[in-house]
């Protein structure tokens, strides 16, 4: 088995402004874009529509050409052998999940609103989303909002997921992903959360970009984890002070 660093790089970064559909039909494309716009709506900040999340999802579902971006962001790794077989099977399963799921969305839309999902107003679209998801519409999220979560962007696989949770996961990924994948156009997803992000993936490999500024430089262990220091039989490490000249 070869390392990913030895895999051939093919293709180029995905153009977020592309209207070429590699997997979705025209109607499916419009439906996914409308659904994404209700999951991360446009308000005072850009939403999924502006981030071109639909492009990200379409490319992901199109096959195995857009799975792993090259380390320098110049294109994508070419899958082969068992890895390609496994990914192809997984993507085919998700393709079926989407086809059936989107058909179900339109069925609910026509049953409750008499029109396809994309033809409904936003209020009726939200109601369809509630019925399809089986959950009420979430409230507004602010920086001081706290709530339980079940999934995170990093390290979450969609294998075996039903349509709605898979769609929500893909919308979040398309909103916050590195732009090489086609979503997060103009880095709007990062801008919404105040994250500058690297100019390119290459910058994360050669040290041009660093996240050091997001870490606390001066700290005292006893302040960070007081509940542990109170119970510990071992001495607490002395405070750490960053070397400003390093």
Image (spheres, rainbow, N blue to C red):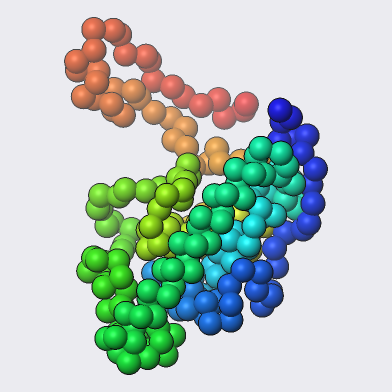
Vertical relation: 207 (above or below) 26: above
The image shows residue 107 at horizontal and vertical percentages of 35, 80
Residue 240 appears in the figure: yes
* Viewer-nearest residue: 1 or 152: 1
Which quarter of the picture shows residue 7? Answer: top right
| Closer to the camera in the image, 85 or 155 | 85
> Visible in this render: residue 191?
no
Q: Residue at x 53, y 82 (%)?
A: 27
In the displayed structure, does residue 49 sit left or right of residue 141? right
Q: Position of residue 63 (x, y in %)?
A: 64, 57
Tally of numbered discs:
0
Q: Residue at x 24, y 66 (%)?
A: 134
Up-down: is 54 above or below 108?
above
Q: Is residue 132 above or below residue 200?
A: below
Quarter the C terminus occupies: top right
Horizontally, residue 189 falls left or right of residue 233, namely right
Residue 158 in the image: x percent, y percent?
46, 50
Which residue corresponds to the image point at 37% horizontal and 74% vertical from the top-left?
A: 104
| Rendered-image quadrant of the N terminus | top right
Image coordinates for residue 48, horizontal then vertical, percent: 49, 70
Question: Residue at (38%, 57%) from the top-left corner?
Answer: 162
Q: Is residue 225 left or right of residue 217?
A: left
């Amino acid at each position: 088995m070869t390392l990913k660093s030895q895999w051939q790089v093919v293709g180029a970064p995905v153009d977020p402004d592309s209207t070429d559909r590699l997997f979705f039909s025209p109607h499916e494309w419009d439906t996914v874009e409308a659904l994404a716009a209700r999951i991360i709506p446009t308000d005072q900040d850009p939403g999924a529509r502006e981030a071109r999340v639909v492009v990200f999802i379409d490319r992901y579902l199109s096959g195995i050409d857009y799975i792993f971006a090259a380390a320098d962001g110049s294109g994508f790794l070419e899958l082969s052998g068992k890895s390609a077989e496994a990914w192809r099977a997984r993507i085919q399963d998700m393709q079926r999940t989407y086809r059936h799921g989107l058909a179900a969305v339109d069925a609910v839309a026509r049953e409750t609103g008499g029109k396809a999902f994309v033809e409904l107003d936003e209020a009726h679209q939200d109601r369809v989303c509630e019925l399809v998801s089986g959950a009420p519409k979430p409230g507004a999220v602010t920086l001081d909002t706290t709530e339980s979560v079940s999934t995170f962007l990093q390290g979450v696989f969609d294998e075996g997921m039903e349509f709605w949770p898979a769609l929500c996961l893909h919308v979040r990924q398309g909103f916050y992903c590195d732009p090489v994948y086609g979503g997060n156009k103009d880095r709007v997803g990062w801008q919404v959360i105040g994250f500058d992000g690297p100019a390119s993936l290459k910058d994360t490999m050669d040290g041009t970009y660093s996240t050091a500024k997001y870490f606390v430089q001066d700290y005292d262990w006893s302040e960070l984890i007081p509940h542990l220091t109170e119970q510990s039989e071992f001495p607490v490490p002395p405070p750490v002070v960053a070397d400003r000249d390093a």
